[in-house]
Image: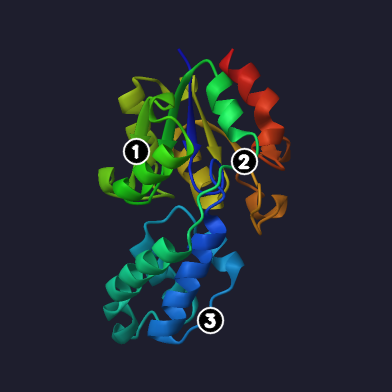
Amino acid sequence: MKGIIFDMDGVLVDAMPYHCKALQIAIKREANIDIDDRTIFLLEGMPADEMIKEIFRRKGYDNNPYYFSIVDKIHNLKKEILKQILIVKPIDGVRELIRELDCLKAIVSGAARQEVEDIIYKTFDREKFDVVITGDDLEEGKPNPDPFETALERMNLKPQEALVVENAPLGVQAANKAGIECIVTLNNSTLTISDFKGLIGEDRVFESTQSATDYLKNWCA
């Protein structure tokens, strides 16, 4: 048996622009710092609190305890803003793809379980996925391999029996560390092929999940 492990935001659902906007608003409101889209997309896959800390480090505030003291406040505000603005919409062609793939299917996301389950139920049939791994199931997020290793364990698969579909460099790093083959689907990301240089071959970076359909079906067969 083979299995495909999908990242959720940006691969299955077009939610990253909303996550990005919500975090930008929260950080601006609480820390008065402007964050560009690209920084957030590059850090996608990290648990939200770790992402906020890394943003502060990149802004040069790593030795300022005040900013790290408001991480939880920013995270909670981001979640509240996201609830107000999020429009859950599947990436083009994904519903059909999930229905047609004849192998095990898993979702791995750093988001909270309730958030992930809500999106799955609104967008897909829950039974279409054999395994769902969320941030609540993990001790460490991407780029640590734990998210994908946990998925493998629950799918009862070896690394060579699985394929990861990602859209962010940290996710590719995590797949590489777990020894799992990976492809990238950019979809509506602000990132480009060059952002994955040294992590994955250019022939495994696809413009969209839909354009990777034949590759995924053939891999499953």
The residue under the point 42% across, 45% down is 119
Image quarter (top left, top right, bottom left or bottom right) of the C terminus: top right
Q: Is residue 51 left or right of residue 14?
A: left
Q: Is residue 101 above or below residue 124?
A: above
Q: CA distance from mark 2 to mark 1?
A: 19 Å
State the SS at label 1: strand
- Whole-angstrom CA distance, mark 3 to mark 2, is 28 Å
State the residue at coordinates (57%, 19%): 100
Residue 110 at x, y percent in the picture? 38, 50
Report x, y in % for residue 97.
59, 27
Front disc: 2 or 1? 1
Mark toward the start of the polypeptide (2 vs 1):
1
What amino acid is labelled 2 in the image? Answer: Val
Q: Quadrant of the N terminus?
A: top left
Q: Which one is in front, 75 or 68?
A: 75
Q: Mark 3 belongs to which amino acid?
A: Asp
Circle 3 residue: 34
Lateral position of residue 122 relative to residue 70, left or right = right
Residue hosting label 2: 184
Crowding around mark 1 (Cα neighbors within 10 Å: few <14, some 14 to 19, many 20+) is many
Nearest to the eye among marks 3 and 2: give it: 3
Does label 3 or label 2 sit earlier along the sequence? 3
* Occupied quadrant, residue 158: top left
Residue depicted at x 41% and y 69%: 81
* Residue bearing mark 1: 133
Q: Quadrant of residue 185?
A: top right
Q: Of marks 3 and 1, which one's residue comes earlier in the chain? A: 3
Q: Secondary structure at mark 3?
A: loop
Residue 19 in the image: x percent, y percent? 48, 61
Q: Amino acid at mark 1?
A: Ile
Q: Residue at x 44, y 41 (%)?
A: 122
Q: Nearer the viewer, residue 30 or 199?
A: 30
